[in-house]
Image (cartoon, coloured by chain):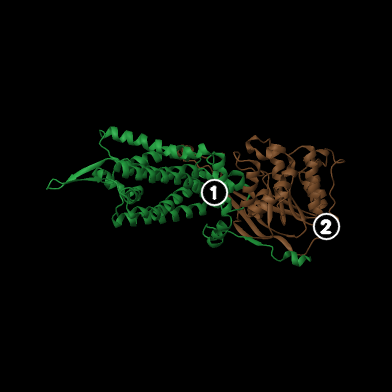
Amino acid sequence: MSEEDEVIITPSQRTVVDEVAVSVQDVCITYRTTFEKRPTLKQAVMRAGRGKRQVKTVEAVKNVSFDVPRGTVLGIIGHNGAGKSTLMRAIAGIIPPTAGRIEVTGRTSTLLALGVGFNPDLTGLENVLLGGLAAGLSKEEVETRFDEIAAFADIGDFIELPMRTYSSGMAARLAFAVSMHMDPDILLIDEALSTGDAAFKEKATAKLRELVDNSSTMLLISHALATVRSMCNEVIWLDHGQMKMRGEPDAVLDTYIEAMHVKKTAAVMNDF
Amino acid sequence: MSADAAIVGRPVQVYEPYRSGLPPLVPYVKNLWRRRHFAIELSRASMRAAHTDTVFGQLWLVINPLLNACVYFLLVNIINGGTRGPDFFTHLIAGLFVFNFLQNSLTQGAESVTKGGKLVLNTSFPLLLLPYATMRTSFYRFLPSMGIYAVLFAGLEYFGPRTQKCNAAGACVDLNTLHFSWIQLLAIPVFAFIWLYVAGLTTFMAALTVYFRDTTQFLPYATRIWLYLSPVLYYADQMKPWMTKFEMFNPLYPILGLWGDVIARGQLPHASWWIATVAWGLGSFAVGTLYFLSRERDFAVRL
């Protein structure tokens, strides 16, 4: 898709209220993780014999502070591993910060890179229900949204089938449909638009525009700079866990692109 | 509606570093209770997926433990030269059914967090709900086996073999080795402590499996050895002296001893077994829960 036929969302009529929706105060996030995809006792015992350790400490986010006023669409950009996703998961309450404080006013809905569908043996609807219940909705609240979600995801009878039968695009459609219909106060989106076919992408963009026009608060992580430029009214640039720059989309994006030593070619600006 | 009115009633969440590595306990427990329907639905859905809700699925829940018990009864009886009676049979199945509950909870529960993959990565909720969902499932699988136990006990009491006891005058009476006693109802509170013990162990294993994914491969061997070391296939008082010394380290020795005394023999066991069962139950629950909570922050970055 070239820049011309891309759906441009203008942040014009948006009303930004003074109230702060998300307040990130001097937050650091450090965690220890392992190199192994699937750590086992067997490997640990074998390693112990050689006196090696396979644990590394990751300082994902370092002393980041910012406020997000209600109604803002905030873009978060940065290189791979800059701490964008970790920061967003901290705002969602999934990873508590190591230092600092995060205040979130209102209910968040996450559309993170991985989507719904944690249990492949259960049907799409069962996964939707469980995801909603885990997020704190009541059974009735989720069930009243079933029809809307099914209609929006538009995956036909697959909604009643175990999720192991889904293609990755279908799972992504369902995930998007769920997070859009949970009526969140704050929507957290992490690169989730990049899957799905052209028709669904258009539908998803239109839905996002609707939310933007309704002054929803949104945090958006994307490497698709054109999307960030057209949808956000503020952008944060994270670099190795630290906030490098914050401001108007055009200003931040231009500096970012310059710093990345890449020309403003179609390849960078292209959507997804 | 003014903007101010819209703000009123919006929940404010504050995320701060954990003190001493644990999440704040009171809000955690409140949240756990508020989202209990997640665990209930997850357990229901996984039972549906395993066809436990169909007629044959339910029948299997009855047949499976029964077959299992028959195999062990046959085995033990052959080894012992066929001298075992109905009192031993009830002791065996009572012990086996509870042991199956423990084994199912552990093997299912150990995988509960690692199987929760995407949900753990994407949603903020008290993760203790994941092992609790499997605890609920294994409890619902255990319940039918208690029905079988009641039927078998009543059947053996009524139709089972009788021994003749004669007094000096030569008058003989038929004595049944099994008889219902109100003491057997104490099995309910005893099971509550067994549940606590198993829940603690299950949450511990659920957390441990995040770090060592192959625990589920060792578990079947570990539980099988544990079964043979515990007074299920034999009576506690039949143990060799060297084994009894070691039994103070085996929680299942007092727990299953108490359970068997209460539900199979209908007799009040000595106080030490009560104390040990209560202590193991509460201790295991506390340690397992605290270990899980202290590691919970890690799960989202380790999966």
Residue at 72% x, 56% y: name it.
Answer: A186
Percent across and percent down for residue A19 are 75, 64
Q: In x, y percent, where is residue A62?
A: 65, 54
A265 is higher (above) or lower (below) than A85 = above
Q: Please say if A52 is above or below A239.
A: above
Comparing B176 with A104, the one in front is: B176
Residue where numbered disc 1 is placed: B130
Q: Position of residue A246 (x, y in %)?
A: 76, 55
The chain displayed green equals: B
Q: Amino acid at mark 1?
A: Leu
Residue B75 position within the rendered picture, expressed as x and y whole percent measured from the top left: 32, 33
Query: Looking at this view, is B214 or B149 the one in front?
Result: B149
Visible residue check, residue A232: no
The chain letter of the brown chain reads: A
Mark 2 or mark 1: which is in front?
Answer: 1
- Res. B50 image quadrant: top right
Specify the quadrant that holds the C terminus of chain A: top right
The residue drawn where x is 72% and y is 38% is A156
**Which of the 4 image quadrants contains residue A17?**
bottom right
The chain to which mark 1 is attached is B
Residue depicted at 83% across the width and 57% down the height? A14
Residue displayed at 42% across by 39% down: B65
Find residue A14 and name its label. 2
The Cα atoms of the two marked residues, 2 and 1, are separated by: 41 Å
Q: Quadrant of residue A161?
A: top right
Observer able to see residue B28:
yes
Q: Secondary structure at mark 2?
A: loop
* Three-letter code, disc 2: Arg
Task: Indicate the secondary structure of the residue bearing disc 1.
Answer: helix
* Mark 1, other Cα within 10 Å: few <14 / some 14–19 / many ≥20: many
